[in-house]
Amino acid sequence: MTATATHTRSTRKQHIYEAAATLFRDKGYNATSMRDLALSVGIEPSSLYSHIKSKEELLSGICFDCGQQFLDGVRAIISDQSTIEDQLRQLIFLHVKIAQDDITSMTVFNDEWRHITEPELSLFLRMRKKYEDDCMVIINSGMDEGVFRNIDSHVVLNAIINSTQWIQRSKRMLSKETGVLGNQISDLILNGLLQDNN
Amino acid sequence: MTATATHTRSTRKQHIYEAAATLFRDKGYNATSMRDLALSVGIEPSSLYSHIKSKEELLSGICFDCGQQFLDGVRAIISDQSTIEDQLRQLIFLHVKIAQDDITSMTVFNDEWRHITEPELSLFLRMRKKYEDDCMVIINSGMDEGVFRNIDSHVVLNAIINSTQWIQRSKRMLSKETGVLGNQISDLILNGLLQDNN
DNA sequence: AAAATACGAATGAACGTTCGTAAGCAAAGA
DNA sequence: TCTTTGCTTACGAACGTTCATTCGTATTTT
């Protein structure tokens, strides 16, 4: 699977993936040329292909890795049985934590996934759908228990998912610690979502 | 100025701008070719240049038009003297309203502005900065009056600005009316931001 | 007649990628 | 120990394709 692309392999390959993520984040996938990437890594463009198969593989590799983190995260939350409110809190913190660990890859995951082409695109979308469905299990439980205000649960899902983009924007604007920022943002979201009775 | 690019002129030119906005939104600026655009409009690629100057002009035109709407909006709110809480409510609704009127252009404004090149880019960033500063005037007043929870005002600014991306995402996911969606979202944000003592 | 709009053909530049090849290095065979 | 073999990593040159744009010219509209 493409999902194993980055975490194994040589230092060089890893370096290429990291440089690609940074370039994709800064300039966008299509505006990033393999010549840009080669320059950033410090080798000739053709030499890149001793390590990777294609430009596309770089993009989908980054996106699948990040997606897997989200998927693993939400499933850990579901299996670990806690109160619904705690699970919701953990769910928001999951987004903050992933942003904290590697905000560059997460930005690519958020903004550049649509440039993945078939057949990987279908796999990616299926993965994302699974993640959203898992989140919905938690959110719907919260709705049933009356923990949230009376809101469409899809809007709640979007509030949580969107928090990553909120972090991106704030990070760019404030260059604050992602951790501090994450706490402020998750508090804000939770305050907005939760019923007033604590 | 480029800002007047779309709202005047012939039907054809308008049609080109609208088609470009849709393509930029769906595929991104760099992934959209002038051949795609010509096909969408129904003429040959070279014929586009009887109406427009360049591909870049399309992007910056769309972005400046949208930016001007934000700028005009926030200034109207500031001049119209109301309570701070009302101004804040209006500020959030401004974002909802612009999304409602033309979510396609707003999506381009949000996601594709970084592909604007100099010298227009500097103008664009200056415009956006002005807008953010004006928003900050309102937000800081709210903070001073204790209307908001105790949060960094920059984080609040980002919450409001980010609402547009929230709407984008929700719209794509739910294909709901932007109006209904906007109300739910602004309520959520306000509940999150406002102090509990109503 | 003048201006606006359309076209086909052509342009140079940039793109991702492939190719043949060579240097460096490790294990295997003599 | 010397040589052979094979693998990894690097390279420069070149490939075919696509890109945005220009040009001269025809057709249509005013």
Image: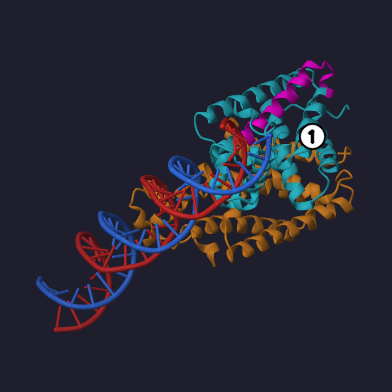
Chain colours: A orange, B cyan, C red, D blue
Q: Residue at x 72, y 20 (%)?
A: B140
What is the quadrant of the C terminus of chain B in the image?
top right
Prevailing secondary structure class for the magenta stretch in the rendered image = helix
Q: Which residue is mark 1?
A: B97
Is B35 left or right of A150, judged from the image as shown?
left
Residue A6 seen: no
Residue A140 seen: yes
* The magenta stretch spans residue A153: no
Instruction: Between residue B25 and residue A60, name the one nearer to us.
Output: B25
Above or below, B95 relative to A38:
above
Instruction: Between residue D24 and residue B86, name the one nearer to us.
Output: D24
- What segment carries the magenta color? B61-86
Q: Judging from the image, what secondary structure is the residue with disc 1 in?
A: helix
Is A20 left or right of B162, judged from the image as shown?
left
Residue B190: x %, y % from top left: 81, 33
Residue A51: x %, y % from top left: 39, 61
Disc 1: CA contacts within 10 A as few (<14), some (14-19) or many (>=20): some
Residue B158: x %, y % from top left: 68, 32
Above or below, A90 relative to A168:
below
Residue C7: x %, y % from top left: 55, 52
Above or below, B125 relative to A112:
above
What is the quadrant of the N terminus of chain B in the image?
top right
Q: Amino acid at mark 1?
A: Lys
Is A62 left or right of C11, judged from the image as shown?
right
Which image quarter: residue A62?
Answer: bottom right
Give the letter of the chain under mark 1.
Answer: B
Q: Residue at x 36, y 62 (%)?
A: A50
Which image quarter: residue A126?
Answer: bottom right
Q: Residue at x 74, y 39 (%)?
A: B102
Above or below, B85 relative to A39:
above
